Image (cartoon, rainbow, N blue to C red):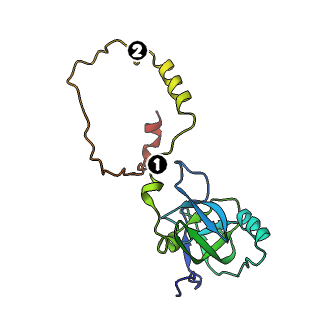
Amino acid sequence: MKDDEIEEEDDNYWIYSLGKEQAEPYVVDVLVSNESLKIEVDTGAAVSVMNEDTYTLLKKKHPNLELKESKVRLNTYTGEQVKVLGQVETSVKYEDQEGIWPLLVITGKGSNLIGRNWLQKIKINWKNLFQLKEDKNTSVKVNKLLEKYEEVFHEELGTFSGPKAKIYVADDASPKYYKARPVAYALREKVEK
């Protein structure tokens, strides 16, 4: 298998994120055919995919973006098959890295995904990806919380009588994210009560 091809021996590949997300996705800005796209990083997806709408927009701007037949079959994590319209070989640029890599075009309006086939070639800037982003509505949200829990945030001393605490964090510490474990189906009803 060449570096820039997706194996096409009627293999099934798995993609895990095409619909609504429970948590905010990790999105990076990538130039695809010299057009800036926000693409979700999905380490659970075996291959990188682009939805039909995005391909149509790119095709209007780049008529030479040829959709080639693909025998690749994609399945979601629930086993549903995702219809693959074809494959394009496209120029990709992320920060200072670039190349011409395959991208499967799928039906529907699901997320555009960077899968493991691209992640083997692109070195994602994980530190920037996991940095906290400023919420433009922060002050409004904080004010609402201050009003709602006024008794907690008043100027007088509270009722805690324990020792003062201080948390020490190394200057070079990098934040780590751990996805919450899903609740077992048998326990969901008890948890929701």
Q: In percent of the image, x 47 and y 39: which residue is there?
A: 189
Nearer to me, 192 or 108:
108
What residue is drawn where x is 76% and y is 64%?
Answer: 57
- Whether label 2 touches label 1, CB < 8 Å: no
- Report helix, strand or loop for mark 2: loop
Q: Quadrant of residue 38?
A: bottom right
Q: Which mark is residue 81?
A: none
The image shows residue 180 at horizontal and vertical percentages of: 41, 48
Mark positioned earlier in the residue sequence (2 or 1): 2
Q: Along the horizontal axis of the image, is 153 left or right of 36? A: left
Secondary structure, mark 1, is helix
The residue indicated by pointer 2 is 154
Residue 24 vs residue 31: left or right?
Answer: left
Task: Give the mark toward the camera: 2 or 1.
Answer: 2
The residue tagged 1 is 185
> Can residue 52 be seen in this snapshot?
yes
Q: Nearer the viewer, residue 103 or 95?
A: 95
- Residue 146 position in % (x across, y down): 48, 21
Question: In this picture, is 77 found above or below 117?
Answer: above
**Amino acid, disc 1:** Tyr
Which residue type does callout 2 highlight? Answer: His
Work out whether 145 lies above or below 107.
Answer: above
Residue 81 visible from this viewpoint = no
> What residue do we see at 26% from left, 37% from top?
167
Query: Residue 78's x, y, as percent?
Result: 55, 61
**What residue appears at the point 53 percent right and 48 percent down from the top-left corner?**
22
Q: Nearer the viewer, residue 177 or 36?
A: 36
Q: Characterize the local packing of mark 1: few (<14), some (14-19) or many (20 or more) Cα atoms within 10 angstroms.
A: few
Q: Is residue 120 left or right of residue 56?
A: left
Q: Residue furthest bottom?
A: 1
